[in-house]
Image: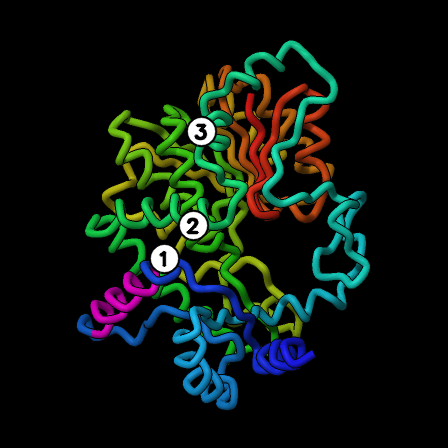
């Protein structure tokens, strides 16, 4: 009862609580170092997005409570307001596509079983290749279904990136993006988000690329380019001259456009003067190419240009029908032992329906990212 009251109070101030890990401590050290570099450069940007911009009570609460929680081995995590805002949106946002924030939402409805490796129920010609996929073997060997094992693996990835000038460049640009989002939220009636994966999700993408060593990666949905940056960083570390081809339909902020002056949630936003994937550091631009437009029109052309693909990463329109379109479009171009990665798997069961239909094993990474092993 007491625990529920404490958690409820913390949520009232716009935060959640989670156990501190070695990974979160290391990322905090990186963030502190970047904050110092940004401050020394004279910029007003600083990492970290306040959950309620201008909410003095929330900031005071954090100053008072965060040190106590750290001593107990826990940390405060900003609770995005869109989790509350999206509860008011429709339960079914498109055919067979469900709002994860809705009170009616069910994990079983979209077959979202975090940490699970999905077995092959209907064997096909791809089954043997999937069963012997080296990345599947590594997921099992590393025990990534265990949160502690996963945290340790990602901590090692973060340590590998420490000191890399391109990674430092990315973090500074990422701080600039977060500062921009805060300012827009303070100036407009709507609620704005950059449409980016978290740093932990980015590190998982980095681990995939470092482990699989793909030569060709095709991605849909880059927005500002957090995921692109981590993929490009891993390709550089692999020293294999890897290539990342991407398709993105950018939403670039214009303060004078009435579209951005509504009291609604904006899930994707790019600063004025920037473009798709702008967070990818200049030193990683070699081998990175992004084209702007609708994936329904451009994805077939990009796949044809790529020829054969080792890794396909979906992070665009998450509706069931569109995700199925992209998966079916990419499959003929995928190499044996390739991998398909899907972000935001909580919206539909399309990832697992597709994996079952083609006879391939799948892995649910903490309910957020899904892998299909070809």
Residue 240 is drawn in which quadrant?
A: top left
Position of residue 116 relative to residue 279, above or below, is: above
Q: Is residue 165 magenta?
A: no
Q: Report the Cα–Cα distance between label 1 and label 3.
A: 22 Å
Q: Report the Cα–Cα distance between label 3 and label 2.
A: 15 Å
Query: Of the residues under marks 3 and 2, which one precedes in the sequence?
Result: 3
- Residue 36 locus on image (x, y percent): 22, 71
- Residue 56 locus on image (x, y percent): 49, 90
> Marks 2 and 3: in contact by CB < 8 Å?
no
Q: Residue at x 45, y 31 (%)?
A: 141
Q: Which residues are magenta?
A: 27-39
Q: Which residue is mark 3?
A: 138
Q: Residue at x 46, y 83 (%)?
A: 65
> Marks 1 and 2: in contact by CB < 8 Å?
yes
Q: Which residue is mark 1?
A: 22
Q: Which residue is mark 2?
A: 151
């Amino acid at each position: 009862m007491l625990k529920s009251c404490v958690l409820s109070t913390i949520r009232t101030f716009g935060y959640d609580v989670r156990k501190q890990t070695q990974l979160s401590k290391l990322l905090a050290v990186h963030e502190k170092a970047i904050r110092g570099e940004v401050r020394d450069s004279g910029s007003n940007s600083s990492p970290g997005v306040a959950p309620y911009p201008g909410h003095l009570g929330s900031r005071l609460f954090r100053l008072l409570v965060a040190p106590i929680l750290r001593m107990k081995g826990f940390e405060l995590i900003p609770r995005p307001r869109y989790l509350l805002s999206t509860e008011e949106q429709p339960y079914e946002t498109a055919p067979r596509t469900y709002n994860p924030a809705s009170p009616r939402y069910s994990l079983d409805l979209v077959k979202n079983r975090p940490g699970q490796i999905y077995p092959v129920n209907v064997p096909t010609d791809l089954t043997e290749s999937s069963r012997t996929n080296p990345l599947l073997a590594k997921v099992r060997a590393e025990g990534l279904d265990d949160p502690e094992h996963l945290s340790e693996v990602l901590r090692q990835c973060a340590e590998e990136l420490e000191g890399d000038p391109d990674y430092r460049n990315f973090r500074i640009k990422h701080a600039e993006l977060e500062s921009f989002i805060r300012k827009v939220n303070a100036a407009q009636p709507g609620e704005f988000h950059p449409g980016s994966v978290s740093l932990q999700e980015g590190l998982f993408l980095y681990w995939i690329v470092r482990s699989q060593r793909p030569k060709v990666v095709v991605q849909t949905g880059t927005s500002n380019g957090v995921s692109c940056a981590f993929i490009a960083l891993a390709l550089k570390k692999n020293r294999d001259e890897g290539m990342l081809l991407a398709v993105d339909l950018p939403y670039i902020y214009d303060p004078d456009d009435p579209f951005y002056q509504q009291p609604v949630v904006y899930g994707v936003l790019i600063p004025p003067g920037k473009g798709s994937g702008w967070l990818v550091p200049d030193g990683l631009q070699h081998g990175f190419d992004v084209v702007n437009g609708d994936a329904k029109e451009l994805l077939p052309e990009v796949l044809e240009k790529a020829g054969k693909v080792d890794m396909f990463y979906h992070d665009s329109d998450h509706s069931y029908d569109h995700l199925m379109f992209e998966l079916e479009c990419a499959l003929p171009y995928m190499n044996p032992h390739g991998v398909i990665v899907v972000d935001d798997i909580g919206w539909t069961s399309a990832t697992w329906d597709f994996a079952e239909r083609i006879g391939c094993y799948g892995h649910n990474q903490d309910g957020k990212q899904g892998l299909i092993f070809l």
